[in-house]
Image: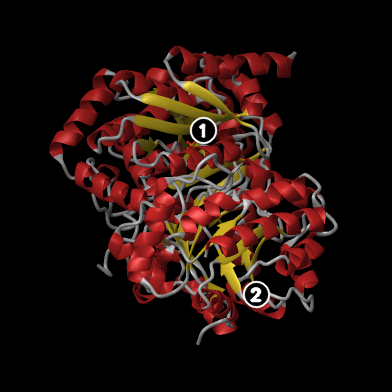
Amino acid sequence: MSAEYPNVATWNAATPNAATWNAAAPNVATWNAAAPSAVASNAVAPNGGAQPGFMADPSAEGRFGEFGGMYVPETLVPACQELDRAFRSAWADPTFRAELTDLLTHYAGRPSPITGCDNLSEELGCTVLLKREDLNHTGSHKINNVLGQALLARRMGKTRLVAETGAGQHGVATATAAALFDMECIVYMGTVDIGRQELNVFRMKLLGSEVRAAKSGSQTLKDAVNEAMRHWVSAVESTHYCLGSVMGPHPYPWMVREFNRVIGDEAAQQCAGLLDGGTPDVVVACVGGGSNAAGIFSGFADTDAELVGVEPAGGAAVGRAVPGIVHGSRSYLMQDEWGQVLEAQSISAGLDYPGIGPEHANLAATGRARYEPVTDAEVVEAFQLLARTEGIITALESAHALAWIVRAQDELAGKTVLLNLSGRGDKDVAQMMDVLG
Amino acid sequence: MTGALEAALRTRRDRGGKCLVPYLTGGLGEDWLETIQAASIAGADAVEIGVPFSDPVMDGPTIQLANDKALASGVTPQLILDRLRGADIGVPTAVMTYGNIAYRMGYQRFASSLADGGVSGCILPDIPLEEVGPWAEAADAAGVETVLLAAPTSPDERLVSIARRSRGFVYGVGLLGITGVRDQLADSARVIAARLKEVTDRPVLVGVGVGTPEQAVEVCEVADGAVVGSAMVQRMLDGGGPEGVAELVGEFRSALDQRF
Ligand SMILES: Cc1ncc(COP(=O)(O)O)c(C=O)c1O
């Protein structure tokens, strides 16, 4: 009993994890060194499971180094523990894996291709490769996670899904899975985001979901998470909370990463083919909560590729590097001196979040990945650049990653950069019409 | 060693009475401290003082609004604790806030600030049993009673661990949901009280969804007492002031005293 419901003493026993985490630090030197790594990119187990080294599974308490955990009201603790058990069992079950792979292939359209960008590469002086998550069904990487969670929810006997959404991409993906699995679905979305992402609001309704406005606080993603959690507290027995990023209480940060690692596993294999067995020099992705970044990073964490997450300057949780506890985990969090959570400010609804997933905090703290801020103005430039040079209208979120490449082009000269193009930009076109006049 | 909060609740129970603990939002309005004092005089056995947090996931619209108003007026945890220091409340108090407020200040500093402010207990609803270790250690060291929540979803064996680690009282969550006044007392309120009474001798109080004197009486047929939040805070928001809140506390007090 005490193993399952640890008392204070068992909790304290978890502290030595900090030591394990520190023990990982010397590896930083290994991968930083220019010397070729012994680990080939495609040596990463393509089917997940426990990997040694960076981006390994969290501790039993759901910690990545000192970050993570399960900071939820008591009402939700049994539900999170049940989810942890259900996910472990499903993820180890070949039938579940096969069912998910089948959906990802025949419904979502995986694998997504990698596109080499000759025009853009010439303009920037580095080789840019795009992992095309924008080509997935529903238009972003969010479908990878949602199909996994919806299958799991069904396996757990849940009949309803509740979700939060910022840009609406996760909401649309959840509404899509709910339609497919004939489940009831409620999506919370901040009032501000409902205004700037009208198209996705309509798509969710068309798919049969109910969209509820989160009217408190900043009326963006943070508040939608609050409302979704409150809803979950009230309906926990019938309802699965389909959380949209690598955040929240354990097991979400880990589970959502595992459902997105298909991005990294595919990309590692594709890059090996394209780069003659090699890996890109740099892997870059935008970071809101961090699910698309975690997905692509997981394919390269044990290589010597440099990992770069790009945050909006107005929502740079890692940039400020102050740890805090909100929405179920301990991670970096934008907050004032008293611990009140600050409102993020970003042109992109999907990155308008004051926190970041706990595994990213750990990757930053250990030095395995670095996190860079870009401004809204740089993002608008990058959005147009990709359309003009490659004929791809990107999501504003993904444009953050490109904006960093543009800014860092001197540093990147001659290198190969893999960018996770997490989503397509149809949803942002109306907003950009206003911005660009 | 039994803390002041638990001692007060046990005294009421030992005399055959039922415990009444109103929740009032700290920093809401100019007269929040007088309101707490008035609640004490009107018959509260202890007072829960909400320290506003920007993202209160366990709270419904009433307490959210109270939080937002208090925060907008510039109130900080330190301001609340400063005013509590040396104030004569007359009954023990417990602060209710969220984990990040304590974490940001540092668990040790927060715990000793509570003790300095004369606060007996502390409730952090988003720090459950698995995560409470570091906080509870700091609180124990400072002599602050950490009250843990038990929910309708908690399995039996978990209730045992929660009751064992809880100090002051065990807070039974009356329903599946967040704070707010409901038309009726949920069946789960009496059920959680009965399940907790099975496993602990500590006072068992039920809160969340106890909004009227009748509902308090109903739950106290099983529980040792009730925590009344949103109904009290609504009275504060309506401008009831110390008198209005005292009147409401008095209604709960006399309903409980008549029945038990
Ligand atoms: C296209 C796209 N990319 C990225 C994100 C940010 O999420 P995450 O950081 O979890 O990948 C979103 C969120 O809405 C999105 O729609």
Query: Toward which corner of the image does residue B94 lie, by quadrant?
Result: bottom right
Q: Is residue A15 visible from the viewing direction of this image?
A: no
Mark 2 beta carbon near ligand 1 (under 8 Å): no
Find residue A279 and name its label: none
Find residue B92 and name its label: 2
Which amino acid, mark 1? Answer: Cys
Q: Is residue A105 left or right of residue A36?
A: left
Quadrant where the image shows the C terminus of chain A: top right
Does A236 appear above or below A368? above
Q: Is residue A15 left or right of residue A225?
A: left
Q: Nearer the viewer, mark 2 or mark 1?
A: 2
Image coords of residue B208 (percent x, y)? 53, 51
Q: Is residue A378 visible from the viewing direction of this image?
A: yes
Q: Nearer the viewer, residue A220 or B40?
A: B40
Density class for disc 1 (Cα within 10 Å; few <14, some 14-19, many ≥20) is many
Q: Residue at x 35, y 56 (%)?
A: B154
Which amino acid, mark 2? Answer: Pro
Q: Residue at x 77, y 44 (%)?
A: B238
Q: Secondary structure at mark 1?
A: loop
Mark 1 beta carbon near ligand 1 (under 8 Å): no
Query: Toward which corner of the image does residue A142 lie, by quadrant?
Result: top left
Q: Secondary structure at mark 2?
A: loop
